[in-house]
Image: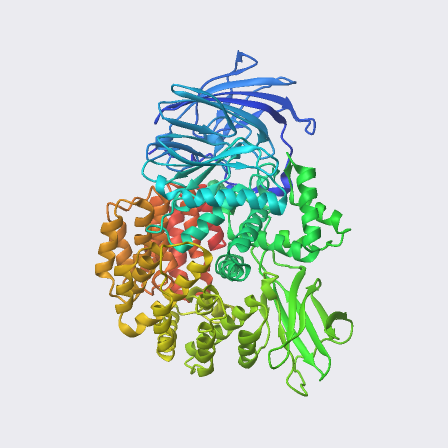
Amino acid sequence: MKDATPQTVRSDPVRLAQYEAPNWLVEDVHLTFRLHPTATRVTSRIRFRPNPDSADRGFRLDGEDLKLLSASIDGRAVEPRIDAEGLSVDAPNDAFIWECEVEIDPKANTRLEGLYMSKGMYCTQCEAEGFRRITFYPDRPDVMAPFTVRIESDQPVMLSNGNPTASGDGWAEWHDPWPKPAYLFALVAGELRATSTTHRTSEGRDATLNVWVRPGDEDRTGYALDALKRSMEWDERVYGRAYDLEVFNLVAVDDFNMGAMENKGLNIFNSKYVLASPETATDRDYELIEGIVAHEYFHNWTGNRITCRDWFQLCLKEGLTVFRDKQFSGDVRGHAVKRIDDVLMLRARQFREDAGPLAHPVRPEEYVEINNFYTATVYEKGAEVIGMLRTLAGPEAYDRALTLYFDRHDGDAATIEDFFACFQEVTGNALTGFERWWSQAGTPRVTAVTHWSGDVLTLTLRQSTPATPGQPQKGPVWIPLATGVLSPDGKEVAPTQVLTLKTSEATFRLEGGIWRPSDGPAADPLPASVEPAPILSLNRGFSAPVILDRKVTDAERLILLAHDTDPFNRWEAGRQVAKEQLLRALDGGALDPAWFDALGRLVSDDSLEPAFRALALGLPSEDDIAQSLHDAGRTPDPARIHAIREDVLQGLAEAQAPLFRALVDALVTHGPYSPDAEAAGRRALRLRALDMLSRLDGGDAAAEVFATADNMTESLSALAILIRRGTGEAESGTFFTRWYDDPNTLDKWFSTVIGNAAPDEAVAVARRLTALPEFDPKTPNRFRSAVGALSANTAAFHHASGEGYRFLADWLIVLDPINPQTAARMTTAFETWRRYDGDRQGMMTDQLRRILATGPSRDVTEIATRLLGD
Ligand code: PHE
Ligand code: ZN
């Protein structure tokens, strides 16, 4: 295979501080594609004009893996100097036309960046720097231009950005009038079928909406199309933003590095986040499809109409768009449950990232490979930062700031400062000091100490943020803590009020139900209660993404669990009790029987939503427990964590057996499957109960559910339960045979079988499954389903033999030359190595060094090097 990353390619970091405006701007772009699987010809005609903001007239274009056939400036042939990353040539002093023709090989493009082929279909992925693999161009987001595209091929459907302008036998032309950076360019050609509808925008224009899939998949497009329409209506209603082209095309492809891509007017999706039918998609899939369709659509304004000046500003489009898609999903599915789900994810991925060697600010200051910064921090913490701005400014000022942002920056390549300035303007500079959230990495810890005098409640908050790589010193950030107070018998005595900690320490006093800053003495750490003190409900709704450290008794937590008016904190109280119980059990202590009772009461409380009850029943994950032990200065033993957690679940199952039996029977859904949140919540609770029951009946009830289920949610959960019980052999075979030729569903088989295998067996299972002819490392979904499932099976990955680590490294070494972007992302599974004992640390770092010794891609080199921290 041709080496995709020649050694001469840049390996030193790009720095935010070194940003320079482009020398040349682009007036417009004309592209012609003559598609051929191994020899596609791309001609470009680009009108350049000098950038008045730059004095330098040097002319350089990015280009990678391109064969230059001809080039000219203003019609005169030129001979550019070509290197591994592009070309340079002497340019005129004033505006000129650059033309060139290149040849590229889409079939050999296994990186899936630029133009590539997926199952006979041509498609592109240009974010972040893929356009330079299509033709020579100033491939940077601050160069924006309208594009006109002509496609010539024998494929029946040919799509690009914007509106269709003309077509004929073997060709089609598209024009996108909206200036855009090259990373939003897209082209698709193939045998595709559309499911369509129209949408009349709030501004009175009609747009045709098409969801394009391969023949045979048309019956699985309805949900995505409906989600698209609802997203459009929501953005009109909530943000006042309407769609701006005559067509909106959304295409599903099977080979894709990420979830989906917001190319202007031509969103390209991993088929996993488009195709859905009750038989093949789980409730979770439906939820993700809805959320991701909305996310990509919302980018039309936050990302496309207003884009990023440079890649350091990535959170400007991603954090904001994630925040918007979460608002949408909360509106559709219920805010409480959505928030709990989101926080679970935030803690599992972003807190973990922020606590390890890959920690970086929401706006990083340097990168070697930008693809390595599409992270939980940029996306999820980036969204939390927007959420805090909304909390601090208030919903109305937030709306005004966003309107100002859209008005002022439409058509711009903007920065975080531009965005923040809109908030400063509408709030009269009230937010000065908030900015550190973008520049400082690490999860802040907040300690809270209360003092109760018998009539005055005092609360002292202190914050600190641990050092992260490259940032040894930290300063205080603004921490808005939504706070309520309950009486000892569980009545709310002070409603939610946001207390904002802006300095390293502050004290607040509750007087007459209102909190006020206090300059009196800090609260005494030993509360001298004259009677039971009121109970504090801190960080309601998880208003700030911090780790709270506060001495709270189990009794207080059980009161919050039973009575808090804030559903998030109700769940959180249960979560904290569960965590403490698990930690106690790990130390050989006995469980508090009151916990199982309280949990039983909550789970059987019919006044609560089933989805909430299902979440309340979930125990902290093994990875979460390991991190908590590490935070407490201890060394986690993954095998023991697994065993003890299983024992606790067994104890819970036994203590509440009748409840779980009753739930499995009572929550059967009747009638045709519906993916709505209510029905999904019932299934979620039923399936949790089924898991509990399987610990008592050896899996009989789960086998019954598997045999009779008419939807993927139940079949897949039942299969997972049976595999965890070690009895799913037959069902696994049935599932494989049934879904053998359905890629997205077969992926579920790989991940379920490997992800739920017992710690001692999982690596052998994973080796067996990755040896099957159905395992193809070239397809990222399949690779993630199999190899990623092993690294997510915590006790198996961290098996004392080190075989889990070896298995992952073996496959990363295979994948890297094929697809460095996906290989790098999966290398991050090693990010927790410092938590563990010396043997495991040695084995993990050995594997990282072994990977580095193969001379991997820039992507993997950067991640492995940062992981090792040397
Ligand atoms: N911009 C895409 C999104 O979040 C993610 C993406 C990044 C997709 C890079 C492909 C490549 O919506
Ligand atoms: Zn995005």
> Which residue is found at the position 44% from the left and 29% from the top?
159
Quick one: 850 or 590, which is closer to the camera? 590
Q: Quick one: quadrant of the N terminus?
A: top left
Most extreme residue toward the front, as rendered?
Answer: 671
58 relative to 374 in the view: left or right:
right
Is residue 697 at least partly visible in the picture?
yes
Note whether 761 is above or below 644 in the view shown.
Answer: above
> Which residue is found at the position 53% from the left and 72% from the top?
573
191 relative to 361 in the view: left or right:
left
- The colour scheme used to paint the residues is rainbow
**Can you give x and y, in whole percent of width and height, for residue 655 in the image?**
38, 80
Quick one: 25 or 670, which is closer to the camera? 670
Note whether 732 is above or below 218 in the view shown.
Answer: below
- In this rendering, the count of numbered labels is 0
Is residue 755 at least partly visible in the picture?
no
**Can you give x and y, in whole percent of width and height, for residue 230 in the image?**
52, 45
Most extreme residue toward the top, as rendered?
Answer: 76
**Can you give x and y, in whole percent of width and height, for residue 784 in the image?**
37, 50
**Can you give x and y, in whole percent of width and height, for residue 162 in the image?**
52, 29
> Which residue is found at the position 38% from the left and 20% from the top?
170
> Which residue is found at the position 36% from the left and 73% from the top?
662
Most extreme residue toward the bottom, as rendered?
Answer: 530
Quick one: 313 or 180, which is closer to the camera? 180
Q: Which of the 4 image quarters holds residue 600?
A: bottom left
Note whether 44 is above or below 372 in the view shown.
Answer: above
Note whether 832 is above or below 698 in the view shown.
Answer: above
